[in-house]
Image (spheres, rainbow, N blue to C red):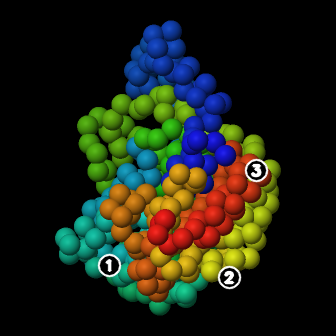
Amino acid sequence: MSSSPLYFDYAATTPVDDRVIQAMVACLGRQANFGNPASTSHAYGNRARQSVELARRQVAELVGTQAERLIWTSGATESNNLALKGVVMAAQGSRRHIITSVIEHKAVIDTARQLEAQGVPVTWLVPNADGLITPEAVAAALRPDTLLVSLMMVNNELGTLTDIARIGELVRAHGALLHVDAAQAAGKVAIDLDALAVDLMSFSAHKIYGPKGIGALYVGAHASGSLQAQIHGGGHEQGLRSGTLATHQIVGMGAAYAIASAEMAEENQRIAALSQRLQTGLLAHPQIRLNGCPQQRIAHTLNLRVDHPGFNPASLSSALAVSSTSACNSASNAASHVLLAMGLAPTQALASLRLSLGRYTSAEEVEQALQAIERALSAPAALW
């Protein structure tokens, strides 16, 4: 085994694909495509603008929409903030009620909490035992004053899939807007925004082998005019997000999404086979259980509870780069809010592992991961 731990934390972030790096480098340096995309009065700016718009089309192609529906942001966190705050601040009339869930990413939870503190009524849905927010739960929470429903497509800790298609139909029929955080879904799940009743959708680049610091927000026809900008200063991006566009990052995101468009089907098949081997090997151990629905999920992310007295995921740190929770919780060493919401005890949540696979995970690494976890389970408790 190499001196560096094996990387099984693709849900936290992915390495930038070498092909993406090459595209980005072409936008850096005085001999490169360095112009300001807003400076369209000369060739430098026009070349940059063309690259930005190509990237917009590349992202749009992967998620099944028109390029002009996408607004560049600094990442999914900003997209989530713009979606929730933007809709509430632009709202007219009596509709102000928001529906979200207690298992969302903190970028949605904390934003909704801030709005709630400002007097916006928020209904917090609780997952079922499988970690799913069901269409029935959403339907029961809808009120005459419901303005917005915000739910993630793929849970970042469990890998479970939300039935966004059915929820979208319910929300659209009710006359409310649906926002979906798709940071963990793009490149892993087929998304066709032209066919879905989704009004706003957040995307990130660094979860899909692109650079950190860049993302996008889809603004559908039903949400057009229902969003107030949160960053002002120049009226860029259709007046919804001001600031000089980071050409190299945008080009990187476009390249990453273009690669996913071409390779997602084959890549998902390969990862599914590796995930099945990992899951079968681990669940054969009587003290390991899967957290979350075993069927309604992506193959890339496995969340496992280790019912072994005294087991600490930190005991694996020298062998495996894994998470016991999301990156936002890891910083505070807190138990996963997602697992606690599912009904796990704090000790069970803290003894759970999230293993996420990706483009560069190999069959050999899966076997090494199985061996590392077996060694940790066999070690005396004093070594944890």
Q: Separation of disc 2 and disc 1 at Cα?
A: 41 Å
Q: Earlier in the sequence, mark 3 or mark 1?
A: 1
User: In screen coordinates, is 275 left or right of 109?
Assistant: right
Please identify the quarter of the rendering in which residue 226 is found: bottom left
- Residue drawn at (27%, 62%), measured in percent from left and top? 89
Which mark is drawn over residue 122? 1
Total labels: the figure holds 3
Residue 51 at what x, y percent from top left? Answer: 55, 27
Query: Rounded to the nearest whole Å, what is the CA distance between mark 3 and mark 2?
Result: 24 Å
Residue 259 coordinates in the image, percent (x, y): 69, 40
Q: Amino acid at mark 2?
A: Pro
Q: Which residue is mark 3?
A: 364
Any part of residue 335 in sight: yes
Q: Residue at x 29, y 51 (%)?
A: 230
State how far apart marks 3 and 1 are (Cα).
47 Å
**Does dot 3 land on a helix, a strand or a loop?**
helix
Residue 286 image label: 2
Q: Secondary structure at mark 1?
A: strand
Q: In the image, which is nearer the foreground, mark 2 or mark 1? A: 2
Q: Mark 3 or 2 closer to N-term?
A: 2
Expressed as whole percent of the image width and height from the top left, the position of residue 126 reads 45, 84
Q: Secondary structure at mark 2?
A: loop
Hey, what amino acid is under mark 1?
Answer: Val
Callout in the foreground (3, 1): 3
Q: Within 10 angstroms of label 3, few (less than 14), some, or many (20 or more) residues?
A: few
Sequence-wise, the earlier of marks 2 and 1 is 1
Type of amino acid at the residue the image marks with label 3 = Glu
